[in-house]
Amino acid sequence: MKKITVGTGTCGIAAGAEKVIEEFKNGMGKFGVKDVELAETGCLGMCYAEVLVEVSNGSGKFLYGNVTPDKVSKIIDQHINQGKPVEEWLVLSNYSSGPEMSFMEKQKRIVLRNCGHLDPLSLDQYIARDGYKALETVLKTMTPDQVIQTMLDSGLRGRGGAGFSTGQKWKFAKNSPGPDKFVVCNADEGDPGAFMDRSVLEGDPHSVLEGMMICGFAIGADHGYVYCRAEYPKAIENLKVAIEQSKKRGFLGDHICGTDFSFHVKIKEGAGAFVCGEETALIASIEGKRGMPRLRPPYPAVKGLWEKPTNINNVETFANIPWIIMNGAAPFAEMGIGKSRGTKVFAMAGKVKRSGLVEVPMGITINEIIFDVCGGILNDKKFKAVQMGGPSGGCIPAELGGTQIDYEQINKTGAIMGSGGMVVMDETTCMVEMARFFLEFTQNESCGKCTSCRLGTLRMLEILTRIVEGKGQANDIDKLMELGQQISSTALCGLGQTAPNPVLTTLKYFRNEYEDHIKKGKCTAHSCPQLVDYIIRTEKCVGCTLCAKNCPSDAIVGMVKKAHKIDPSKCVKCGKCITVCNFDAVYKD
Protein backbone atom coordinates (compact mmCIF):
# COMPACT_ATOMS: atom_id res chain seq x y z
CA MET A 1 0.00 0.00 0.00
CA LYS A 2 1.25 3.45 -0.87
CA LYS A 3 1.71 5.93 1.93
CA ILE A 4 2.13 9.70 2.08
CA THR A 5 3.65 10.99 5.31
CA VAL A 6 3.80 14.68 6.18
CA GLY A 7 6.13 16.08 8.85
CA THR A 8 3.97 17.85 11.41
CA GLY A 9 6.42 18.71 14.13
CA THR A 10 6.32 22.32 15.29
CA CYS A 11 8.82 23.27 12.55
CA GLY A 12 6.66 21.59 9.90
CA ILE A 13 3.48 23.26 11.11
CA ALA A 14 5.24 26.64 11.15
CA ALA A 15 6.25 26.07 7.51
CA GLY A 16 2.66 25.24 6.48
CA ALA A 17 2.27 21.48 6.98
CA GLU A 18 -1.42 21.72 7.88
CA LYS A 19 -2.22 23.39 4.55
CA VAL A 20 -0.17 20.77 2.73
CA ILE A 21 -2.12 17.95 4.41
CA GLU A 22 -5.41 19.58 3.51
CA GLU A 23 -4.26 19.93 -0.10
CA PHE A 24 -3.32 16.23 -0.20
CA LYS A 25 -6.80 15.32 1.05
CA ASN A 26 -8.42 17.46 -1.63
CA GLY A 27 -5.98 16.34 -4.32
CA MET A 28 -6.46 12.63 -3.71
CA GLY A 29 -10.20 13.11 -4.10
CA LYS A 30 -9.71 15.20 -7.24
CA PHE A 31 -7.44 12.62 -8.91
CA GLY A 32 -9.47 9.65 -7.68
CA VAL A 33 -6.59 8.24 -5.66
CA LYS A 34 -7.50 5.20 -3.57
CA ASP A 35 -5.64 2.81 -1.29
CA VAL A 36 -3.17 5.49 -0.24
CA GLU A 37 -2.67 6.22 3.45
CA LEU A 38 -2.12 9.84 4.50
CA ALA A 39 -0.12 9.94 7.75
CA GLU A 40 1.78 12.35 9.98
CA THR A 41 5.17 12.11 11.66
CA GLY A 42 7.52 14.17 13.82
CA CYS A 43 10.60 16.17 12.88
CA LEU A 44 13.27 14.33 10.89
CA GLY A 45 15.76 17.05 11.78
CA MET A 46 15.80 18.72 8.38
CA CYS A 47 13.99 21.80 9.65
CA TYR A 48 15.54 23.92 6.89
CA ALA A 49 13.67 21.87 4.24
CA GLU A 50 10.21 21.82 5.81
CA VAL A 51 7.53 21.01 4.80
CA LEU A 52 8.85 17.45 4.34
CA VAL A 53 6.69 14.85 2.59
CA GLU A 54 7.62 11.19 2.23
CA VAL A 55 6.05 8.98 -0.42
CA SER A 56 6.62 5.28 0.16
CA ASN A 57 5.62 2.26 -1.88
CA GLY A 58 7.01 -1.11 -2.84
CA SER A 59 9.95 0.44 -4.66
CA GLY A 60 11.22 2.54 -1.77
CA LYS A 61 10.88 5.79 0.11
CA PHE A 62 11.13 9.20 -1.51
CA LEU A 63 11.47 12.36 0.56
CA TYR A 64 10.38 15.72 -0.81
CA GLY A 65 11.52 19.00 0.75
CA ASN A 66 10.11 22.52 0.81
CA VAL A 67 6.70 21.23 -0.21
CA THR A 68 4.02 23.88 -0.61
CA PRO A 69 0.32 23.39 -1.39
CA ASP A 70 0.86 24.28 -5.07
CA LYS A 71 3.30 21.33 -5.45
CA VAL A 72 0.88 18.72 -4.12
CA SER A 73 -1.07 18.11 -7.34
CA LYS A 74 2.06 17.27 -9.31
CA ILE A 75 3.29 14.87 -6.63
CA ILE A 76 -0.07 13.08 -6.64
CA ASP A 77 -0.46 12.97 -10.42
CA GLN A 78 3.12 12.16 -11.41
CA HIS A 79 4.37 10.10 -8.45
CA ILE A 80 1.30 8.46 -6.94
CA ASN A 81 -0.64 7.84 -10.15
CA GLN A 82 2.17 7.40 -12.69
CA GLY A 83 4.90 6.05 -10.42
CA LYS A 84 7.41 8.69 -11.53
CA PRO A 85 9.02 10.64 -8.66
CA VAL A 86 9.31 14.40 -9.20
CA GLU A 87 13.10 14.35 -9.24
CA GLU A 88 13.70 18.11 -8.95
CA TRP A 89 11.88 18.30 -5.60
CA LEU A 90 13.45 15.22 -3.99
CA VAL A 91 15.93 15.71 -1.15
CA LEU A 92 16.47 12.02 -0.32
CA SER A 93 15.71 8.71 -1.97
CA ASN A 94 15.58 5.63 0.26
CA TYR A 95 17.71 7.67 2.70
CA SER A 96 20.80 6.54 0.80
CA SER A 97 21.02 9.06 -2.04
CA GLY A 98 19.95 12.57 -2.93
CA PRO A 99 21.20 16.14 -2.69
CA GLU A 100 20.85 16.21 1.10
CA MET A 101 22.64 12.92 1.73
CA SER A 102 25.62 14.75 3.24
CA PHE A 103 23.26 15.91 6.00
CA MET A 104 22.75 12.28 7.01
CA GLU A 105 26.11 10.63 6.22
CA LYS A 106 28.01 11.64 9.37
CA GLN A 107 25.07 11.30 11.70
CA LYS A 108 24.50 8.33 13.99
CA ARG A 109 20.90 8.30 15.18
CA ILE A 110 20.12 6.77 18.56
CA VAL A 111 18.02 9.41 20.31
CA LEU A 112 16.47 10.43 16.99
CA ARG A 113 16.15 6.86 15.72
CA ASN A 114 12.36 7.04 15.45
CA CYS A 115 11.79 10.76 14.88
CA GLY A 116 10.43 11.32 11.40
CA HIS A 117 9.95 7.58 10.85
CA LEU A 118 6.80 6.81 12.81
CA ASP A 119 3.52 8.36 13.82
CA PRO A 120 4.18 9.61 17.37
CA LEU A 121 0.54 8.95 18.24
CA SER A 122 0.73 5.28 17.23
CA LEU A 123 1.81 2.83 19.92
CA ASP A 124 1.64 0.00 17.38
CA GLN A 125 4.24 1.69 15.20
CA TYR A 126 6.50 2.21 18.21
CA ILE A 127 6.17 -1.46 19.13
CA ALA A 128 6.91 -2.42 15.50
CA ARG A 129 10.24 -0.62 15.87
CA ASP A 130 11.11 -2.69 18.98
CA GLY A 131 9.39 -0.29 21.35
CA TYR A 132 9.06 -1.44 24.98
CA LYS A 133 11.21 -4.52 24.31
CA ALA A 134 13.94 -2.96 26.42
CA LEU A 135 11.49 -2.52 29.28
CA GLU A 136 10.36 -6.15 29.05
CA THR A 137 13.99 -7.30 28.92
CA VAL A 138 14.83 -5.34 32.05
CA LEU A 139 11.76 -6.45 34.01
CA LYS A 140 12.05 -10.14 33.13
CA THR A 141 15.77 -10.82 32.79
CA MET A 142 17.74 -8.18 34.74
CA THR A 143 18.20 -6.95 38.29
CA PRO A 144 18.32 -3.24 39.21
CA ASP A 145 22.07 -3.54 39.83
CA GLN A 146 22.58 -5.07 36.38
CA VAL A 147 20.69 -2.21 34.75
CA ILE A 148 22.80 0.36 36.58
CA GLN A 149 26.00 -1.50 35.68
CA THR A 150 24.93 -1.45 32.03
CA MET A 151 24.59 2.32 32.22
CA LEU A 152 28.01 2.60 33.86
CA ASP A 153 29.60 0.36 31.24
CA SER A 154 28.03 2.36 28.40
CA GLY A 155 29.68 5.56 29.58
CA LEU A 156 26.44 7.51 29.14
CA ARG A 157 26.65 10.94 30.73
CA GLY A 158 23.70 13.21 31.40
CA ARG A 159 22.80 15.17 28.28
CA GLY A 160 21.24 18.06 30.18
CA GLY A 161 24.45 20.06 30.51
CA ALA A 162 26.76 19.00 33.32
CA GLY A 163 27.63 15.62 31.81
CA PHE A 164 27.52 13.66 35.06
CA SER A 165 27.66 9.86 34.79
CA THR A 166 24.11 8.55 34.36
CA GLY A 167 24.88 5.18 35.93
CA GLN A 168 26.54 6.82 38.94
CA LYS A 169 23.57 9.14 39.39
CA TRP A 170 21.17 6.19 39.33
CA LYS A 171 23.39 4.33 41.80
CA PHE A 172 23.25 7.22 44.28
CA ALA A 173 19.44 7.31 44.08
CA LYS A 174 19.12 3.53 44.44
CA ASN A 175 21.36 3.46 47.50
CA SER A 176 19.54 6.31 49.23
CA PRO A 177 17.31 4.88 51.97
CA GLY A 178 13.55 5.23 51.88
CA PRO A 179 10.55 3.40 50.39
CA ASP A 180 9.39 6.30 48.21
CA LYS A 181 11.49 7.52 45.32
CA PHE A 182 10.84 9.55 42.17
CA VAL A 183 12.03 9.79 38.58
CA VAL A 184 11.85 13.23 36.98
CA CYS A 185 12.34 14.05 33.31
CA ASN A 186 13.60 17.59 32.81
CA ALA A 187 11.98 18.84 29.59
CA ASP A 188 12.09 22.53 30.50
CA GLU A 189 14.60 23.44 27.74
CA GLY A 190 14.79 27.21 28.04
CA ASP A 191 17.95 27.99 26.04
CA PRO A 192 17.45 30.34 23.07
CA GLY A 193 18.05 28.34 19.91
CA ALA A 194 17.54 24.93 21.55
CA PHE A 195 14.73 22.56 20.52
CA MET A 196 16.13 19.06 21.00
CA ASP A 197 13.80 17.97 23.81
CA ARG A 198 10.74 19.42 22.12
CA SER A 199 11.39 17.52 18.91
CA VAL A 200 11.95 14.20 20.70
CA LEU A 201 8.78 14.55 22.79
CA GLU A 202 6.83 15.50 19.68
CA GLY A 203 8.29 12.78 17.48
CA ASP A 204 8.95 9.85 19.82
CA PRO A 205 7.34 10.29 23.26
CA HIS A 206 7.21 6.56 24.04
CA SER A 207 11.02 6.25 24.04
CA VAL A 208 11.23 8.83 26.83
CA LEU A 209 8.54 7.08 28.88
CA GLU A 210 10.31 3.74 28.38
CA GLY A 211 13.61 5.24 29.54
CA MET A 212 11.93 6.70 32.62
CA MET A 213 10.38 3.35 33.54
CA ILE A 214 13.70 1.54 33.18
CA CYS A 215 15.23 4.16 35.48
CA GLY A 216 12.35 3.67 37.94
CA PHE A 217 13.00 -0.06 38.03
CA ALA A 218 16.73 0.48 38.55
CA ILE A 219 16.46 2.92 41.47
CA GLY A 220 13.29 1.55 43.07
CA ALA A 221 10.86 4.32 42.12
CA ASP A 222 7.25 3.82 41.14
CA HIS A 223 6.30 7.41 40.27
CA GLY A 224 7.63 9.83 37.70
CA TYR A 225 7.10 13.38 36.48
CA VAL A 226 7.79 14.98 33.13
CA TYR A 227 8.44 18.68 33.71
CA CYS A 228 7.71 20.33 30.36
CA ARG A 229 7.27 24.01 29.65
CA ALA A 230 3.74 25.00 28.64
CA GLU A 231 5.12 26.72 25.51
CA TYR A 232 5.48 23.20 24.05
CA PRO A 233 1.78 22.38 23.49
CA LYS A 234 2.32 19.75 20.81
CA ALA A 235 4.97 17.96 22.87
CA ILE A 236 2.62 17.90 25.87
CA GLU A 237 -0.30 16.74 23.72
CA ASN A 238 1.68 13.85 22.22
CA LEU A 239 3.06 12.91 25.62
CA LYS A 240 -0.45 12.76 27.12
CA VAL A 241 -1.59 10.47 24.31
CA ALA A 242 1.45 8.24 24.77
CA ILE A 243 0.81 7.96 28.52
CA GLU A 244 -2.82 6.93 28.00
CA GLN A 245 -1.90 4.43 25.27
CA SER A 246 0.77 2.86 27.47
CA LYS A 247 -1.65 2.54 30.37
CA LYS A 248 -4.24 0.73 28.24
CA ARG A 249 -1.68 -1.71 26.88
CA GLY A 250 -0.12 -2.54 30.23
CA PHE A 251 3.20 -0.78 29.69
CA LEU A 252 2.44 1.83 32.33
CA GLY A 253 0.58 1.61 35.62
CA ASP A 254 0.37 -1.36 37.97
CA HIS A 255 2.01 -4.76 37.36
CA ILE A 256 3.70 -3.75 34.13
CA CYS A 257 4.16 -6.62 31.65
CA GLY A 258 2.71 -8.99 34.24
CA THR A 259 5.43 -8.32 36.81
CA ASP A 260 5.41 -6.82 40.30
CA PHE A 261 6.83 -3.53 39.00
CA SER A 262 4.48 -0.55 38.89
CA PHE A 263 5.14 2.93 37.55
CA HIS A 264 2.93 5.99 37.15
CA VAL A 265 3.72 9.20 35.25
CA LYS A 266 2.33 12.71 35.58
CA ILE A 267 3.04 15.80 33.51
CA LYS A 268 3.87 19.08 35.20
CA GLU A 269 3.56 22.07 32.88
CA GLY A 270 6.08 24.77 33.70
CA ALA A 271 5.39 28.47 33.26
CA GLY A 272 8.51 29.09 31.18
CA ALA A 273 10.95 30.27 33.84
CA PHE A 274 14.50 29.62 32.63
CA VAL A 275 15.70 28.99 36.17
CA CYS A 276 13.40 25.96 36.44
CA GLY A 277 15.82 24.12 34.20
CA GLU A 278 18.02 23.97 37.32
CA GLU A 279 17.06 20.77 39.11
CA THR A 280 16.38 22.14 42.59
CA ALA A 281 14.26 24.98 41.18
CA LEU A 282 12.44 22.43 39.03
CA ILE A 283 11.67 20.36 42.12
CA ALA A 284 10.31 23.41 43.92
CA SER A 285 8.05 24.15 40.95
CA ILE A 286 6.63 20.61 40.88
CA GLU A 287 5.88 20.96 44.59
CA GLY A 288 3.84 24.07 43.87
CA LYS A 289 6.40 26.52 45.18
CA ARG A 290 8.11 29.38 43.43
CA GLY A 291 10.84 27.98 41.17
CA MET A 292 14.00 29.02 42.98
CA PRO A 293 17.19 27.00 43.48
CA ARG A 294 18.54 25.91 46.84
CA LEU A 295 21.98 25.10 48.09
CA ARG A 296 23.38 21.63 47.46
CA PRO A 297 24.14 19.27 49.17
CA PRO A 298 21.88 17.52 49.89
CA TYR A 299 21.54 16.54 46.25
CA PRO A 300 18.21 15.38 44.81
CA ALA A 301 19.43 11.77 44.77
CA VAL A 302 19.37 11.97 48.57
CA LYS A 303 16.66 14.55 49.25
CA GLY A 304 14.70 15.68 46.21
CA LEU A 305 11.00 15.84 45.39
CA TRP A 306 9.08 16.16 48.65
CA GLU A 307 12.41 15.41 50.33
CA LYS A 308 12.44 11.89 48.87
CA PRO A 309 15.34 10.43 46.83
CA THR A 310 14.86 11.64 43.26
CA ASN A 311 16.67 11.00 39.99
CA ILE A 312 16.53 13.77 37.39
CA ASN A 313 17.66 13.34 33.78
CA ASN A 314 16.69 15.23 30.68
CA VAL A 315 14.74 14.03 27.64
CA GLU A 316 17.77 13.11 25.55
CA THR A 317 19.32 11.04 28.34
CA PHE A 318 16.15 8.98 28.83
CA ALA A 319 15.70 8.46 25.07
CA ASN A 320 19.14 6.77 24.96
CA ILE A 321 18.26 4.16 27.59
CA PRO A 322 16.10 1.71 25.56
CA TRP A 323 18.68 1.60 22.75
CA ILE A 324 21.50 0.86 25.19
CA ILE A 325 19.52 -1.96 26.84
CA MET A 326 18.60 -3.54 23.50
CA ASN A 327 22.01 -3.16 21.85
CA GLY A 328 24.26 -3.48 24.89
CA ALA A 329 26.64 -1.12 26.61
CA ALA A 330 29.62 -1.92 24.37
CA PRO A 331 28.25 -0.59 21.03
CA PHE A 332 27.37 2.69 22.73
CA ALA A 333 30.74 2.93 24.47
CA GLU A 334 32.57 2.22 21.21
CA MET A 335 31.32 5.53 19.84
CA GLY A 336 32.95 8.70 21.09
CA ILE A 337 36.23 9.84 22.52
CA GLY A 338 37.82 9.92 25.98
CA LYS A 339 35.19 10.05 28.69
CA SER A 340 32.51 11.21 26.25
CA ARG A 341 30.79 8.18 24.75
CA GLY A 342 27.87 7.66 22.41
CA THR A 343 26.21 10.42 20.44
CA LYS A 344 25.02 13.97 21.05
CA VAL A 345 22.03 15.78 19.60
CA PHE A 346 22.55 19.41 18.58
CA ALA A 347 20.04 22.05 17.59
CA MET A 348 21.70 23.99 14.80
CA ALA A 349 20.55 27.59 14.55
CA GLY A 350 21.86 30.91 13.37
CA LYS A 351 23.87 31.57 10.19
CA VAL A 352 24.07 28.01 8.93
CA LYS A 353 22.67 26.66 5.66
CA ARG A 354 21.01 23.58 7.09
CA SER A 355 19.39 24.50 10.37
CA GLY A 356 17.71 21.77 12.36
CA LEU A 357 18.54 18.77 14.51
CA VAL A 358 21.62 16.60 14.07
CA GLU A 359 22.83 13.63 16.09
CA VAL A 360 26.52 12.94 15.75
CA PRO A 361 29.05 10.66 17.45
CA MET A 362 31.10 12.23 20.22
CA GLY A 363 34.54 13.12 18.92
CA ILE A 364 33.39 14.78 15.71
CA THR A 365 34.73 18.32 15.32
CA ILE A 366 32.78 21.56 15.33
CA ASN A 367 33.89 22.23 11.74
CA GLU A 368 32.60 18.84 10.60
CA ILE A 369 29.17 19.57 12.05
CA ILE A 370 28.94 23.06 10.58
CA PHE A 371 30.46 22.41 7.14
CA ASP A 372 30.04 18.70 6.38
CA VAL A 373 26.67 18.05 8.03
CA CYS A 374 25.05 21.47 7.89
CA GLY A 375 26.47 22.64 4.58
CA GLY A 376 28.48 25.62 5.80
CA ILE A 377 27.64 29.24 6.44
CA LEU A 378 24.56 30.91 5.00
CA ASN A 379 25.25 32.92 1.82
CA ASP A 380 28.82 31.54 1.91
CA LYS A 381 29.97 34.19 4.36
CA LYS A 382 32.92 33.66 6.68
CA PHE A 383 32.45 31.49 9.77
CA LYS A 384 33.20 33.60 12.81
CA ALA A 385 32.13 31.76 15.97
CA VAL A 386 29.63 29.43 17.55
CA GLN A 387 27.82 29.85 20.86
CA MET A 388 27.58 26.49 22.61
CA GLY A 389 25.55 25.75 25.71
CA GLY A 390 23.07 28.61 25.38
CA PRO A 391 23.19 31.56 27.80
CA SER A 392 25.13 29.39 30.25
CA GLY A 393 27.67 28.46 27.59
CA GLY A 394 30.39 30.32 25.82
CA CYS A 395 31.58 31.53 22.47
CA ILE A 396 34.05 29.39 20.51
CA PRO A 397 35.88 31.23 17.69
CA ALA A 398 36.37 29.87 14.18
CA GLU A 399 40.07 29.20 14.80
CA LEU A 400 39.02 26.57 17.36
CA GLY A 401 36.63 24.90 14.92
CA GLY A 402 38.84 21.80 14.99
CA THR A 403 37.85 21.20 18.62
CA GLN A 404 36.30 17.78 19.09
CA ILE A 405 32.89 17.37 20.66
CA ASP A 406 33.99 16.14 24.05
CA TYR A 407 32.88 17.46 27.45
CA GLU A 408 36.40 18.14 28.64
CA GLN A 409 37.70 19.68 25.40
CA ILE A 410 34.69 21.98 25.06
CA ASN A 411 35.10 23.08 28.68
CA LYS A 412 38.72 24.05 28.00
CA THR A 413 37.54 26.64 25.46
CA GLY A 414 35.47 28.39 28.14
CA ALA A 415 32.18 27.11 26.73
CA ILE A 416 30.14 24.10 27.86
CA MET A 417 28.41 21.29 26.00
CA GLY A 418 25.14 22.27 27.64
CA SER A 419 21.98 20.60 26.47
CA GLY A 420 23.09 20.88 22.85
CA GLY A 421 22.28 24.27 21.38
CA MET A 422 24.65 25.62 18.71
CA VAL A 423 24.12 29.17 17.47
CA VAL A 424 26.40 29.73 14.49
CA MET A 425 27.63 33.25 13.70
CA ASP A 426 29.21 34.75 10.60
CA GLU A 427 31.32 37.83 9.90
CA THR A 428 28.30 40.14 10.20
CA THR A 429 27.74 39.22 13.85
CA CYS A 430 28.93 41.71 16.46
CA MET A 431 30.35 39.70 19.35
CA VAL A 432 29.72 42.49 21.85
CA GLU A 433 26.05 42.62 20.87
CA MET A 434 25.87 38.82 20.95
CA ALA A 435 27.20 38.81 24.52
CA ARG A 436 24.75 41.57 25.44
CA PHE A 437 21.84 39.57 23.98
CA PHE A 438 22.58 36.44 26.02
CA LEU A 439 23.27 38.40 29.19
CA GLU A 440 20.01 40.30 28.79
CA PHE A 441 18.25 36.95 28.61
CA THR A 442 19.85 35.58 31.79
CA GLN A 443 19.37 38.88 33.62
CA ASN A 444 15.67 38.90 32.78
CA GLU A 445 15.38 35.25 33.82
CA SER A 446 17.27 35.59 37.11
CA CYS A 447 15.13 34.35 39.97
CA GLY A 448 16.57 37.12 42.14
CA LYS A 449 17.39 34.92 45.11
CA CYS A 450 21.10 35.78 45.26
CA THR A 451 22.62 39.24 44.98
CA SER A 452 25.43 38.10 42.68
CA CYS A 453 23.07 37.09 39.92
CA ARG A 454 20.27 39.60 40.55
CA LEU A 455 22.44 42.73 40.62
CA GLY A 456 25.73 41.53 39.15
CA THR A 457 24.23 40.59 35.79
CA LEU A 458 22.30 43.88 35.75
CA ARG A 459 25.50 45.88 36.18
CA MET A 460 27.16 43.86 33.41
CA LEU A 461 24.18 44.40 31.14
CA GLU A 462 24.28 48.16 31.74
CA ILE A 463 27.96 48.25 30.73
CA LEU A 464 27.41 46.16 27.61
CA THR A 465 24.43 48.28 26.58
CA ARG A 466 26.39 51.50 26.71
CA ILE A 467 29.26 49.91 24.80
CA VAL A 468 27.04 48.90 21.86
CA GLU A 469 25.44 52.35 21.96
CA GLY A 470 28.83 54.00 21.50
CA LYS A 471 29.08 55.28 25.06
CA GLY A 472 31.70 52.86 26.35
CA GLN A 473 34.20 54.00 28.97
CA ALA A 474 37.92 53.28 29.22
CA ASN A 475 37.64 50.92 32.20
CA ASP A 476 34.54 49.02 31.03
CA ILE A 477 36.46 45.91 29.96
CA ASP A 478 38.15 45.64 33.35
CA LYS A 479 34.79 46.09 35.09
CA LEU A 480 33.21 43.34 32.98
CA MET A 481 36.05 40.95 33.77
CA GLU A 482 35.87 41.67 37.49
CA LEU A 483 32.09 41.38 37.69
CA GLY A 484 32.05 38.21 35.59
CA GLN A 485 34.61 36.48 37.77
CA GLN A 486 32.84 37.51 40.99
CA ILE A 487 29.44 36.28 39.78
CA SER A 488 30.93 33.00 38.59
CA SER A 489 32.44 32.31 42.02
CA THR A 490 29.62 33.53 44.27
CA ALA A 491 26.25 32.91 42.59
CA LEU A 492 23.96 30.39 44.27
CA CYS A 493 23.15 28.03 41.38
CA GLY A 494 24.78 26.79 38.22
CA LEU A 495 22.76 29.12 36.02
CA GLY A 496 23.97 32.19 37.90
CA GLN A 497 27.54 30.92 38.02
CA THR A 498 27.63 30.44 34.25
CA ALA A 499 25.69 33.60 33.30
CA PRO A 500 28.88 35.63 32.60
CA ASN A 501 30.29 32.97 30.23
CA PRO A 502 29.18 34.63 26.95
CA VAL A 503 30.85 37.87 28.08
CA LEU A 504 34.02 36.27 29.44
CA THR A 505 34.58 34.12 26.35
CA THR A 506 33.99 36.96 23.89
CA LEU A 507 36.42 39.08 25.91
CA LYS A 508 38.90 36.22 25.68
CA TYR A 509 38.63 35.67 21.94
CA PHE A 510 37.26 38.96 20.56
CA ARG A 511 38.66 41.61 22.90
CA ASN A 512 39.58 43.71 19.87
CA GLU A 513 35.89 44.22 19.08
CA TYR A 514 35.23 45.58 22.56
CA GLU A 515 38.21 47.92 22.17
CA ASP A 516 37.03 49.10 18.75
CA HIS A 517 33.61 49.91 20.20
CA ILE A 518 35.09 51.86 23.12
CA LYS A 519 38.21 53.47 21.70
CA LYS A 520 37.36 53.93 18.02
CA GLY A 521 33.60 54.24 18.25
CA LYS A 522 33.25 51.61 15.53
CA CYS A 523 31.54 48.25 15.22
CA THR A 524 33.79 46.22 12.94
CA ALA A 525 30.90 43.88 12.09
CA HIS A 526 28.83 46.90 11.00
CA SER A 527 26.05 45.62 13.20
CA CYS A 528 25.53 48.12 16.04
CA PRO A 529 23.39 50.96 14.60
CA GLN A 530 24.86 53.71 16.76
CA LEU A 531 28.39 52.86 15.63
CA VAL A 532 27.73 52.67 11.92
CA ASP A 533 27.68 55.37 9.25
CA TYR A 534 25.56 54.99 6.13
CA ILE A 535 27.29 56.19 2.97
CA ILE A 536 26.24 56.37 -0.68
CA ARG A 537 28.80 55.39 -3.31
CA THR A 538 28.59 58.23 -5.79
CA GLU A 539 30.02 56.09 -8.58
CA LYS A 540 27.16 53.59 -8.22
CA CYS A 541 24.26 55.90 -7.42
CA VAL A 542 22.07 56.57 -10.51
CA GLY A 543 19.83 59.11 -8.79
CA CYS A 544 16.69 57.00 -8.91
CA THR A 545 15.52 58.79 -5.67
CA LEU A 546 14.14 55.52 -4.24
CA CYS A 547 16.29 55.81 -1.10
CA ALA A 548 15.26 59.43 -0.53
CA LYS A 549 11.57 58.61 -0.91
CA ASN A 550 11.83 55.83 1.69
CA CYS A 551 14.04 57.66 4.22
CA PRO A 552 11.89 58.29 7.34
CA SER A 553 14.04 61.22 8.50
CA ASP A 554 14.58 63.02 5.17
CA ALA A 555 18.33 62.55 5.60
CA ILE A 556 18.99 61.78 1.91
CA VAL A 557 19.28 64.62 -0.55
CA GLY A 558 20.01 64.84 -4.27
CA MET A 559 18.54 65.53 -7.67
CA VAL A 560 17.00 63.04 -10.06
CA LYS A 561 19.67 61.16 -12.04
CA LYS A 562 22.38 62.70 -9.86
CA ALA A 563 24.33 61.01 -7.07
CA HIS A 564 22.65 61.40 -3.68
CA LYS A 565 24.17 62.03 -0.25
CA ILE A 566 23.22 61.16 3.33
CA ASP A 567 23.22 63.86 5.99
CA PRO A 568 24.71 62.07 9.07
CA SER A 569 23.14 64.61 11.43
CA LYS A 570 19.64 63.56 10.31
CA CYS A 571 20.27 59.85 9.68
CA VAL A 572 18.50 57.62 12.22
CA LYS A 573 20.42 54.58 10.93
CA CYS A 574 17.34 52.48 10.22
CA GLY A 575 18.97 50.83 7.19
CA LYS A 576 15.97 51.38 4.92
CA CYS A 577 18.21 52.94 2.25
CA ILE A 578 20.24 49.74 1.93
CA THR A 579 17.10 47.64 1.74
CA VAL A 580 15.48 49.58 -1.11
CA CYS A 581 18.59 50.38 -3.19
CA ASN A 582 18.72 48.26 -6.35
CA PHE A 583 22.24 49.29 -7.35
CA ASP A 584 24.29 48.35 -4.26
CA ALA A 585 25.12 52.02 -3.88
CA VAL A 586 24.60 52.28 -0.09
CA TYR A 587 26.96 50.68 2.38
CA LYS A 588 27.73 50.70 6.10
CA ASP A 589 31.07 51.98 7.34
Image (tube, grey):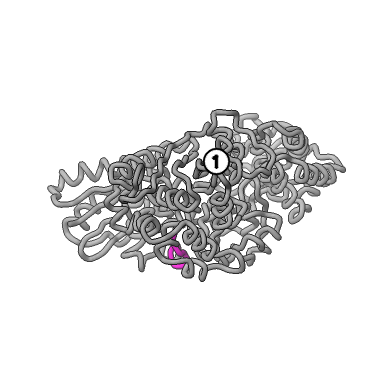
The residue lying toward the viewer, choosing from 504 and 560, is: 504
Is 389 a magenta residue?
A: no
Compared with 250, 146 (above or below) is below
Q: Is residue 498 visible?
A: yes
User: Which residue: 38% across, 58% down?
Assistant: 134
Q: Quadrant of residue 468?
A: top right
Estimate the x, y position of residue 551 in percent, counting from the top left: 61, 33
Estimate the x, y position of residue 529 in percent, counting from the top left: 68, 39
Estimate the x, y position of residue 116 in percent, counting from the top left: 36, 53
The residue lying toward the viewer, choosing from 79 and 216, is: 216
Q: Main secondary structure of the magenta part?
A: loop
Is 108 a magenta residue?
A: yes
Magenta stretch?
103-110
User: What is the three-letter code of the residue carrying label 1?
Assistant: Val
Q: Is residue 534 visible?
A: no
Estimate the x, y position of residue 405 in percent, counting from the top left: 59, 63
Quadrant location of the N terminus?
Answer: bottom left
Q: Is residue 310 left or right of residue 59?
A: right
User: Which residue: 42% across, 61% down?
Assistant: 325
Write down the residue under mark 1: 580
Q: Quadrant of residue 253?
A: top left
User: Which residue: 28% across, 51% down?
Assistant: 5
Q: How many marks can you see?
A: 1
Q: Is residue 54 left or right of residue 183?
A: left
Compared with 198, 397 (above or below) is below
